[in-house]
Structures are given as structure tokens and as C-alpha cells.
Image (cartoon, rainbow, N blue to C red):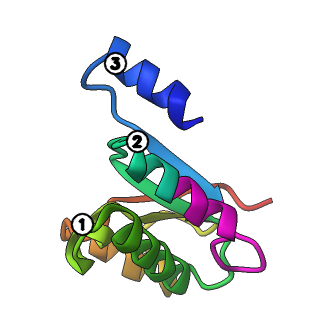
Amino acid sequence: MVDALRRLLAARPGTEVYLTLGADRGVLPAAGADLAAEAAAARLGVNAWSVAGATDPRAAVDGLAAVLEDAYGYDAAAALRHSGAVLAEPPGPAASGPAAELRTLRDQGRLGRVSFTLAP
């Protein structure tokens, strides 16, 4: 995947890249950390990485940020700005808990991405 994204970015400079990784038992699986390390080694610029399916979205975002710190050499703030989450909660003003906290971080420019999926 990293090589395909590098070719895409070479052919279409300025394309934004957002990668979403599935959570395994609520946390980022080792394969996600391996992919981040491979992307960093290839100097692949990813606008934001996000975690979907986490039982504790804030902990998953913090874990993802730690992975990005290690892989890309980011400081904590930069790693968080390249991190995000996909939440199965309503995006509306009534959102509370992790959805509200993560959306606030995004609105403050401290989090790279928050997106929502419709819960079944």
C-alpha cells in the first residue's frame, strides 16, 4: 500500500492522504504500527491517520499518536495533529463523551481528523 500511495502522490502532487486503521479489541493492532513505520521509512506524507472501532476512542487516539511519534519522530503535539478517530456516535451538537472531546480537540486544531459513521 505504501508504494501505491507514493506513486499516486508522485503523479498527483497535493493529494491529501487519510488512512484509517481498524482497532483490534479496542486498540491499534501491531499491523497498524508496522504500516506507520513503513510509511515513515518511505517518507510518505499522510495528512492524518485514524482509528475506527475502538472501544475507548480517546485511548486509541493516544496510542496512535504514540505510534506516530515513534515512526515519524514527531513531538507529542505534532503526532496528535496527525491522529484521529472514526466514531459510531452522532456528530450533532448532542454528542457527548469521547465524540465531544475528540471533536473539541479537532476544532482547536490539535487533532487531525474526526469522522463519524452511522451506527446500525
Instruction: Tell me where residue 45 appears, x and y as whole percent.
Output: 32, 42
Q: Residue at x 29, y 75 (%)?
A: 105
Name the residue nearer the viewer: 118 or 94.
118
**Residue 101 position (above or below residue 91):** below
Identify the image quadrant of the C terminus: bottom right
Residue 43 colored magenta? Answer: no
Residue 31 colored magenta? Answer: yes
All told, the count of numbered labels is 3
Disc on the earlier residue, 2 or 1 = 2
Q: Residue at x 44, y 82 (%)?
A: 62
Name the residue nearer the viewer: 49 or 38.
38
- Marks 3, 1: nearer the viewer: 3
Residue placed under numbered mark 1 in the picture: 107
- Marks 3, 2: nearer the viewer: 2
Instruction: Tell me where residue 95 appears, x and y as whole percent.
Output: 48, 76
Residue placed under numbered mark 3 in the picture: 10
Residue placed under numbered mark 2 in the picture: 42
Callout 1: helix, strand or loop?
helix
Taking 97 as reference, is 111 left or right?
left
